Each structure stands twice: as structure tokens, then as C-alpha cells.
Amino acid sequence: MLIYIHFVHEQSSGIAVNDACIAAYHELKLKKSYKYIVFKISDDKTQIEVEKTSTSSDYDEFLSNLPSDDCRFAVYDFIFEIPDAGERQKLCFYFWSPDTAKIKPKMLYASSKEAIRKRLDGINTEIQGTDIDEVSYKSVFDKVMRTTR
């Protein structure tokens, strides 16, 4: 059993990050061209690709792009207000792995997370969600507030 756990931990998925993912991320981060980006593993399971970009600041719309039965990665430019301190902004990386997803996609996304995460410089907060409550505006707000002060 210990060998199996070690093997799973050390095993990487071998899935590449498409250059379009990094280009879109830089558009969001540096030029503020997007509010959020949703990434998925390609159907042929060879690379992480951009599934959707949006300029909408509607958080509920962003959440509607996270499928109820499949995994995704996302980056959201989270802007929030701190009383007596003004507006703040945090780039949040989301690892969405809902409880209702099948085990193979969960394992594939989990083993591919670091491949994309380490290519996205400047991420302030990482959000891991297995249900919609864990990625709700309030939950994310509470998490970014803990890292802000």
C-alpha cells in the first residue's frame, strides 16, 4: 500500500499546458482583457487548453461555467472591498473537482494541476472546490481576506 501511494504521488500525468493558456492568462493578468478563464484537459487527454474566457464580472456566471459532473481549472480576477481600506484584487486559481465527477477525471486533473499551476506566475490564492459552497463568493471572499491582512 505504501508503494502505491508513493507511486501515485510521484506520477505525473504527462499532460502539457497549451501555450494559449499562458497567453490568455497574461491577457487577464497584465492587460485586464478578461475577468476569468476556464481551462480543461483536451478530449484526447494530451494537453490543458482554454475552454472559455470572459470579460463578465458576474461571479454567478463564472460559477455556471464549472460543470457539475466534471473537473476544471480556472483563474478569476477577484476584486473585493475592504471596509476603510478600499478595493483590493487577488488572482485566484481554482481547482474544481466536484464530488459528482468520475474518478478517472479527478485523478487526471489532480495529477495535472501542478503543470498549469506552476506556469501561472502571480497567483495570490488557490481555491479547491468539491461542491458549489466551497467556491461561493462568500467562501472565496473569506479565504482572500485571510491572506490579505
Image (tube, grey):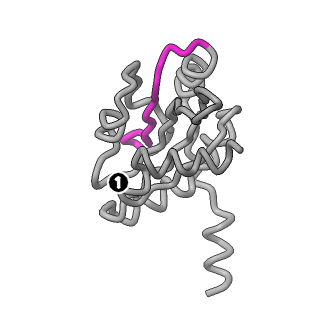
Please tell me which residue lies in front, 25 or 144: 144
Element at label 1: helix
Relative to 93, residue 95 above or below: below
Q: Amino acid at mark 1?
A: Ile
Segment tinted magenta in the rendering: 31-44
| 20 drawn magenta | no
Which quadrant holds residue 87?
A: top right
User: Horizontal and vertical percent for residue 145?
Assistant: 61, 46
Q: Residue furthest front?
A: 84
Please tell me which residue lies in front, 82 or 96: 82
In the displayed structure image, the side of residue 46 where residue 98 appears, left or right: left
> What residue is rendered at 43% in x and 34% in y?
38
Residue of label 1: 132
| 33 drawn magenta | yes
Relative to 58, residue 92 above or below: below
Which quadrant holds residue 122?
A: top right
Relative to 142, residue 85 above or below: above
